Amino acid sequence: MDRFQKLAMSGLTTDTEIIFLGTGTSIGVPVIGCHCDVCTSSDPKNNRLRASILVRSPDGSLVVDTGPDFRQQCLREKITHLDAAIFTHAHTDHIIGFDDLRRFTVGNDSTIDIYANQCCLNRLERCFDYLFSGENIYHGYLKPVPHLITGPFSVCGWEITPLPVSHGKVDTLGFHFLSKSGIRFAYIPDAKTLSGEALRQIQQIPLLILDGLQMSGHSTHLSIPEAVEIALQVKARQVWLTHLSCRVNYQTIEPDLPPNIRFAWDGLIIPIVS
């Protein structure tokens, strides 16, 4: 099923959409060496690359996070153009595919804007020092233009507000998106707790994409029950859980969720309207 078939199934026609490039946890699903029911499942919704989304609108296309599966995700979704990349945090499963952005700057003077907090920019500059050294002048190299996230910023027609969240010992962000036409959604793929400011920003949000690692508790991620509690607390209208581990069987767990809360899957397209 191609992208337009999946879009048509929604019953909506819109030129603004979110594509789930990946919905898995840091080790992906199936997990190497694991033979659980999910890792051996024939249901494609239980097969998950590392978490990332593409946001496409008439004003441009941006990606949130470039994990180790980024190249594969771009090929699967036939992505040929990007205007910007935004990063939630510096963990490997969210940044290590950074160099694959080079295919979007193959023109002699082409660049791509990247947005991250200071911790994440520092990690990118250490991991990919050759891209930030000032000597990166060759045709085939990635040419990033870094932007430090210190507050709300504008890109591709969106006003994006960073949402501070707790995720272990790493400074991590979720993002609140607001378009000129009033489209509003939030993406928070890695979190254990949300700050008061983050909770305020997502009150009654039409669309919330939220971390929901597994049913049982975890030290650095929201469990599914915790994510459901937050979604109900903020009165989000439509909720998609992501960053799912192999302890999440799509077929057996999702039917027990509230009707407006669902598990996302790789390749899912959500048309969004104001």
Image (spheres, grey):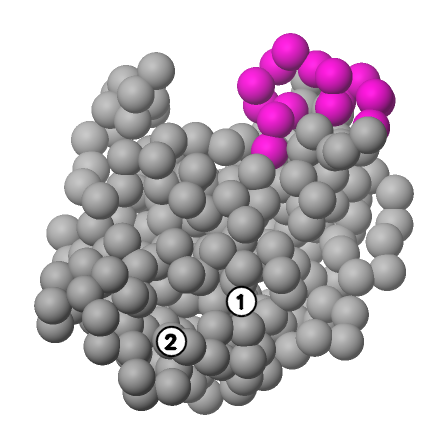
**In magenta stretch: residue 41:** yes
Which residues make up the magenta segment? 34-48
Report which residue position mark 2 lands on: 131
Q: Is residue 240 left or right of residue 85?
A: right
Residue type at mark 1: give it. Answer: Thr
* Cα distance in 3D space between marks 1 and 2: 20 Å
**Displayed quadrant of residue 33:** top right
Q: Is residue 213 visible?
A: yes
Relative to residue 48, is residue 161 depicted above or below? below
Task: Tell me the quarter of the picture where residue 111 sits.
Answer: bottom left
What count of labels does the image hold? 2
When the figure is inspected, residue 1 is found, relative to residue 90, above or below; the finding is above
Few, some or many residues within 10 Å of mark 1 (<14, 14–19, 20+) = many
- Spot occupied by residue 41 in the image (x, y as percentages of width and height): 70, 15
Q: Main secondary structure of the magenta part?
A: loop
Q: Amino acid at mark 2?
A: Leu
Specify whether residue 131 is painted magenta.
Answer: no
Q: Is residue 38 shown left or right of residue 79?
A: right
Q: Residue at x 29, y 77 (%)?
A: 136
Dot 1 corresponds to which residue?
88
In the rendered view, tell whether residue 242 sits above or below residue 185.
above
